[in-house]
Amino acid sequence: MHGTRKWYSLRWQVALTALALAGGAWHYAIGRFPHPVGSGPAGPPVGAAAFRRVWSRDRVRLVGVGDSITDGFGAAPGHGYFDLLVENDDAAYRDMAGRDLKHVFPRLEARNLAVSTTTSDQHLAWQVPRIERAPPGVRGIAVITSGGNDLIHDYGRKPPRDGAAYGCTYAQALAWKERYRERLRGILSGIAGKFPAGCELFVANVYDPTDGVGDIEHAHLLLPPWPDGFRVLTAFNAVIAEECAAFPRAHLVDIHAAFLGHGIHCRDRRNPYYRREDPHYWYFTNLEDPNERGYDAIRRVFLEEIVTMDHLQPE
């Protein structure tokens, strides 16, 4: 007759089960989303042909307006996308040597007014008024990132509202996106009005660190789930695209498409946006900003759009 097993004879099994459960929980929470950043050039290749000639010897003024992306938060000095647009770091990015705005606009003036943590209402109220009115004959180029902070602040810590929409429902977003549209129109018209000789407005849309999945809670342990987040992001990006199409000399810079496959699912081969040629993470540790490879990619996407403008090209 076999005796009854003592409870302590099962302790190793209990311990193994607990370890397995803990490991599974860790894997679900963060372990399944490793974030390798990779190395080398990031983003689309930029052809050299357009940069072999001067586009204009007149004065051209480059203005940066927006949030931490244009401010360059998290990048080393000179490595934010705005700085790289002005002048490439030839030692760090050899493939981009000579492919910057200083080479094609010898009399380029640059001023970056963007400030980290700001939202679209602050861009309209604080930054646009600080742009100096250009003298006759001075053309403008404005690069703008505005709208991302309207969505992610206050990270779900407070009830969502217009300008800090994290956690809102899609129904709430339908009203707030129209208020955002009004602010974006004000930003575009306000900047354009500072340049009597004309200004090209390059507006980036908002990227998606979930690579189209919508599971923002897995991007950062402190972020609560946002069931309607993907639909809200899509709605705000639609506003940006619509306003760029409607406003004279406004151009959409599609960083959303460029960054798909470089978010928290960058290693997931089943994701439809998986980038076999570069399955790496382009976001900074705070999630909402790019890392240095991300900034490299953003300047390339901006340049891709800038070089297509015929009136900026030499005759």
Image (tube, rainbow, N blue to C red):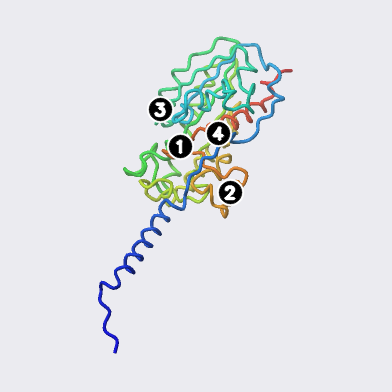
Instruction: Between label 3 and label 1, give the one nearer the viewer.
Output: 1
If the image is split into quadrants, where does the N terminus sit?
A: bottom left
The answer to whether mark 1 and mark 2 are in CB contact below 8 A is no
Q: Which residue is mark 4?
A: 243
**Looking at numbered disc 3 in the image, what kind of residue is underneath it?**
Gln
**Which of the marked residues, 3 or 2, is nearer the chain's N terminus?**
3
Q: Which residue is mark 1?
A: 284
Crowd tier of the residue under label 2, counting other residues whose Cα lies within 10 Å: few below 14, some 14–19, many 20 or above: many
- Determine the CA span between mark 3 and mark 1: 23 Å
The answer to whether mark 3 and mark 2 are in CB contact below 8 A is no
Q: 199 or 3: which is nearer to us?
A: 3
Q: Is residue 84 above or below residue 219?
A: above
Instruction: Between label 4 and label 2, give the one nearer the viewer.
Output: 2
**Looking at numbered disc 1 in the image, what kind of residue is underneath it?**
Phe
Q: Is residue 161 above or below residue 62?
A: below
The answer to whether mark 4 and mark 2 are in CB contact below 8 A is no
Q: Secondary structure at mark 3?
A: helix
Picture mark count:
4
**Which of the marked residues, 1 or 2, is nearer the chain's N terminus?**
2
Q: Quadrant of residue 60?
A: top right
- Determine the CA span between mark 3 and mark 2: 36 Å
Q: Residue at x 57, y 55 (%)?
A: 270
**Which of the marked residues, 3 or 1, is nearer the chain's N terminus?**
3
In this view, the residue farthest toward the right is 315
Q: Which residue is mark 3?
A: 122
**Looking at numbered disc 2 in the image, what kind of residue is underneath it?**
Tyr
Q: Which residue is mark 2?
A: 274
